[in-house]
Protein backbone atom coordinates (compact mmCIF):
# COMPACT_ATOMS: atom_id res chain seq x y z
CA UNK A 1 0.00 0.00 0.00
CA UNK A 2 1.27 3.48 -0.90
CA UNK A 3 1.60 5.81 2.07
CA UNK A 4 1.18 9.45 1.06
CA UNK A 5 2.16 12.49 3.12
CA UNK A 6 -0.65 14.01 5.18
CA UNK A 7 0.48 17.49 4.13
CA UNK A 8 -0.73 16.67 0.62
CA UNK A 9 -4.18 15.52 1.74
CA UNK A 10 -5.94 18.66 0.45
CA UNK A 11 -4.20 18.37 -2.91
CA UNK A 12 -5.17 14.70 -3.15
CA UNK A 13 -8.82 15.45 -2.45
CA UNK A 14 -9.05 18.28 -4.94
CA UNK A 15 -7.27 16.42 -7.75
CA UNK A 16 -9.41 13.34 -7.11
CA UNK A 17 -12.53 15.50 -7.29
CA UNK A 18 -11.44 17.15 -10.55
CA UNK A 19 -10.44 13.83 -12.12
CA UNK A 20 -13.66 12.20 -10.97
CA UNK A 21 -15.96 14.73 -12.62
CA UNK A 22 -15.64 13.48 -16.17
CA UNK A 23 -18.29 15.81 -17.58
CA UNK A 24 -16.63 18.94 -16.16
CA UNK A 25 -13.20 17.77 -17.30
CA UNK A 26 -14.51 17.07 -20.78
CA UNK A 27 -16.06 20.56 -20.94
CA UNK A 28 -12.84 22.15 -19.70
CA UNK A 29 -10.87 20.42 -22.47
CA UNK A 30 -13.27 21.51 -25.20
CA UNK A 31 -13.33 25.08 -23.91
CA UNK A 32 -9.53 25.11 -23.77
CA UNK A 33 -9.23 23.91 -27.35
CA UNK A 34 -11.49 26.73 -28.50
CA UNK A 35 -9.44 29.36 -26.64
CA UNK A 36 -6.11 31.09 -27.47
CA UNK A 37 -4.41 29.13 -24.68
CA UNK A 38 -4.66 26.00 -26.84
CA UNK A 39 -1.70 27.32 -28.83
CA UNK A 40 0.46 26.08 -25.96
CA UNK A 41 -0.45 22.53 -26.96
CA UNK A 42 -0.81 23.06 -30.70
CA UNK A 43 2.75 24.40 -30.90
CA UNK A 44 4.56 22.31 -28.29
CA UNK A 45 3.17 19.05 -29.69
CA UNK A 46 4.87 19.85 -33.02
CA UNK A 47 8.24 20.39 -31.39
CA UNK A 48 11.10 17.90 -31.23
CA UNK A 49 10.96 16.30 -27.74
CA UNK A 50 14.75 15.98 -27.71
CA UNK A 51 15.44 19.72 -27.67
CA UNK A 52 13.94 23.10 -26.83
CA UNK A 53 12.88 24.78 -30.05
CA UNK A 54 11.45 28.21 -30.97
CA UNK A 55 8.00 26.59 -31.10
CA UNK A 56 8.29 25.81 -27.38
CA UNK A 57 9.18 29.38 -26.48
CA UNK A 58 6.22 30.74 -28.42
CA UNK A 59 3.99 28.08 -26.84
CA UNK A 60 4.92 29.30 -23.36
CA UNK A 61 3.72 32.81 -24.20
CA UNK A 62 0.25 31.42 -24.99
CA UNK A 63 -0.24 30.81 -21.27
CA UNK A 64 0.94 34.22 -20.17
CA UNK A 65 4.62 34.35 -19.15
CA UNK A 66 7.06 36.03 -21.48
CA UNK A 67 10.75 35.46 -22.01
CA UNK A 68 13.22 38.20 -22.72
CA UNK A 69 15.25 38.29 -25.92
CA UNK A 70 18.34 37.47 -23.86
CA UNK A 71 16.72 34.44 -22.25
CA UNK A 72 15.42 33.10 -25.54
CA UNK A 73 18.78 33.76 -27.16
CA UNK A 74 20.61 31.74 -24.51
CA UNK A 75 18.18 28.81 -24.72
CA UNK A 76 18.42 28.66 -28.51
CA UNK A 77 22.14 29.42 -28.62
CA UNK A 78 24.99 26.92 -28.61
CA UNK A 79 25.48 26.74 -24.83
CA UNK A 80 21.79 26.58 -24.00
CA UNK A 81 21.11 23.92 -26.62
CA UNK A 82 24.03 21.81 -25.49
CA UNK A 83 23.13 21.91 -21.79
CA UNK A 84 19.37 21.51 -22.12
CA UNK A 85 19.57 18.78 -24.75
CA UNK A 86 21.99 16.83 -22.57
CA UNK A 87 19.49 16.81 -19.70
CA UNK A 88 16.47 16.07 -21.90
CA UNK A 89 18.32 13.00 -23.21
CA UNK A 90 18.19 11.59 -19.66
CA UNK A 91 14.41 12.13 -19.35
CA UNK A 92 12.24 9.76 -21.44
CA UNK A 93 9.50 11.63 -23.28
CA UNK A 94 6.89 8.92 -22.65
CA UNK A 95 7.41 8.58 -18.89
CA UNK A 96 4.67 9.56 -16.43
CA UNK A 97 5.38 11.29 -13.13
CA UNK A 98 4.19 8.48 -10.87
CA UNK A 99 6.28 5.94 -12.82
CA UNK A 100 9.47 8.02 -12.87
CA UNK A 101 12.39 7.01 -10.68
CA UNK A 102 14.17 9.45 -8.39
CA UNK A 103 17.11 9.93 -10.77
CA UNK A 104 14.78 11.02 -13.58
CA UNK A 105 12.95 13.45 -11.34
CA UNK A 106 16.29 14.89 -10.22
CA UNK A 107 17.29 15.46 -13.86
CA UNK A 108 14.09 17.41 -14.41
CA UNK A 109 14.97 19.44 -11.31
CA UNK A 110 18.42 20.05 -12.83
CA UNK A 111 16.80 21.50 -15.94
CA UNK A 112 14.47 23.61 -13.79
CA UNK A 113 17.39 25.14 -11.89
CA UNK A 114 19.44 25.62 -15.07
CA UNK A 115 16.67 27.65 -16.68
CA UNK A 116 16.04 29.59 -13.49
CA UNK A 117 19.70 30.67 -13.43
CA UNK A 118 19.02 32.36 -16.76
CA UNK A 119 16.36 34.52 -15.14
CA UNK A 120 13.22 32.68 -16.27
CA UNK A 121 10.34 32.97 -13.82
CA UNK A 122 9.08 29.87 -12.02
CA UNK A 123 5.89 30.02 -14.07
CA UNK A 124 7.69 30.29 -17.42
CA UNK A 125 10.17 27.57 -16.44
CA UNK A 126 7.59 24.97 -15.43
CA UNK A 127 5.50 25.75 -18.50
CA UNK A 128 8.53 25.21 -20.70
CA UNK A 129 9.27 21.92 -18.94
CA UNK A 130 5.63 20.88 -19.32
CA UNK A 131 5.85 21.66 -23.03
CA UNK A 132 8.80 19.27 -23.37
CA UNK A 133 7.60 16.53 -20.98
CA UNK A 134 3.79 16.87 -20.66
CA UNK A 135 3.37 13.41 -19.11
CA UNK A 136 5.95 14.12 -16.44
CA UNK A 137 5.95 17.79 -15.45
CA UNK A 138 3.03 19.70 -13.91
CA UNK A 139 2.84 23.46 -14.41
CA UNK A 140 3.43 25.43 -11.23
CA UNK A 141 2.10 28.95 -10.79
CA UNK A 142 -0.09 30.95 -8.42
CA UNK A 143 -3.29 29.65 -10.03
CA UNK A 144 -2.29 26.01 -9.55
CA UNK A 145 -1.07 26.48 -5.99
CA UNK A 146 -4.23 28.35 -5.02
CA UNK A 147 -6.50 25.73 -6.58
CA UNK A 148 -4.66 22.75 -5.08
CA UNK A 149 -3.65 24.37 -1.80
CA UNK A 150 0.03 23.63 -1.67
CA UNK A 151 2.90 25.95 -0.85
CA UNK A 152 5.45 27.48 -3.22
CA UNK A 153 8.50 25.21 -3.33
CA UNK A 154 11.30 24.04 -5.59
CA UNK A 155 9.75 20.59 -5.11
CA UNK A 156 6.54 21.77 -6.80
CA UNK A 157 6.05 18.36 -8.44
CA UNK A 158 5.95 16.54 -5.09
CA UNK A 159 2.22 16.98 -4.32
CA UNK A 160 1.36 15.74 -7.82
CA UNK A 161 3.74 12.78 -7.55
CA UNK A 162 2.03 11.69 -4.35
CA UNK A 163 -1.40 11.89 -5.95
CA UNK A 164 -1.00 10.63 -9.50
CA UNK A 165 -1.54 6.90 -9.80
CA UNK A 166 -3.01 4.46 -12.32
CA UNK A 167 -6.59 4.87 -11.07
CA UNK A 168 -6.61 8.67 -11.22
CA UNK A 169 -4.82 8.65 -14.57
CA UNK A 170 -7.40 6.28 -16.02
CA UNK A 171 -10.23 8.60 -14.94
CA UNK A 172 -8.53 11.49 -16.71
CA UNK A 173 -7.97 9.42 -19.85
CA UNK A 174 -11.67 8.54 -19.89
CA UNK A 175 -12.66 12.22 -19.90
CA UNK A 176 -10.02 13.02 -22.51
CA UNK A 177 -11.18 10.22 -24.81
CA UNK A 178 -14.78 11.39 -24.59
CA UNK A 179 -13.74 14.94 -25.51
CA UNK A 180 -11.57 13.54 -28.31
CA UNK A 181 -14.66 11.99 -29.87
CA UNK A 182 -15.63 15.59 -30.71
CA UNK A 183 -12.13 17.00 -31.26
CA UNK A 184 -9.72 14.22 -32.34
CA UNK A 185 -6.63 16.35 -31.67
CA UNK A 186 -7.35 16.11 -27.94
CA UNK A 187 -6.44 12.42 -27.99
CA UNK A 188 -2.76 13.46 -27.98
CA UNK A 189 -3.08 15.27 -24.64
CA UNK A 190 -1.16 13.65 -21.77
CA UNK A 191 -3.24 12.95 -18.62
CA UNK A 192 -1.07 15.39 -16.65
CA UNK A 193 -1.86 18.14 -19.15
CA UNK A 194 -5.58 17.30 -19.10
CA UNK A 195 -5.61 17.50 -15.32
CA UNK A 196 -3.81 20.86 -15.39
CA UNK A 197 -6.53 22.23 -17.67
CA UNK A 198 -9.15 20.86 -15.31
CA UNK A 199 -7.46 22.49 -12.32
CA UNK A 200 -7.46 25.88 -14.04
CA UNK A 201 -11.13 25.67 -14.86
CA UNK A 202 -12.22 24.50 -11.40
Image (cartoon, rainbow, N blue to C red):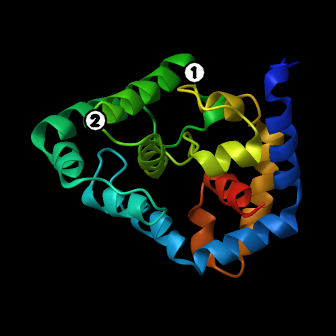
Where 78 sits versus 107, above or below? below
Q: Which residue is mark 1?
A: 101
Please name which of the two marks, 2 or 1, marks the residue nearer to the observer. Answer: 2
Q: Quadrant of the N terminus?
A: top right
Q: Position of residue 28 (x, y in %)?
A: 73, 69
Res 178 visible: no
- Give the camera-side residue of 166 and 199: 199
N-terminal-most mark, 2 or 1: 2
| Label 2: which secondary element | helix
- Mark 2–mark 1 Cα distance, whole angstroms, equals 20 Å
Where 154 sits versus 71, above or below? above
In the image, taking residue 61 as reference, residue 53 lies left or right, namely left
Q: Which residue is mark 2?
A: 84
| Residues at circles 2 and 1 in contact by the CB criterion of under 8 Å | no
In the image, taking residue 23 as reference, residue 47 lies left or right, namely left
Q: Position of residue 170 (x, y in %)?
A: 79, 49
Q: Residue at x 49, y 47 (%)?
A: 130
Q: Quadrant of the C terminus?
A: bottom right
Res 112 visible: yes
Q: Residue at x 52, y 43 (%)?
A: 94
Amino acid sequence: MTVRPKRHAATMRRLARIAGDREALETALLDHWASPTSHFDRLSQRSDPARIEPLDLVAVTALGPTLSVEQAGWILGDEGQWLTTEILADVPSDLSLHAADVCTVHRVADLFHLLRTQGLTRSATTRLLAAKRPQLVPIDDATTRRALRYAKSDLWWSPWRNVMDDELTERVRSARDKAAAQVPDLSAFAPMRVLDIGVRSS
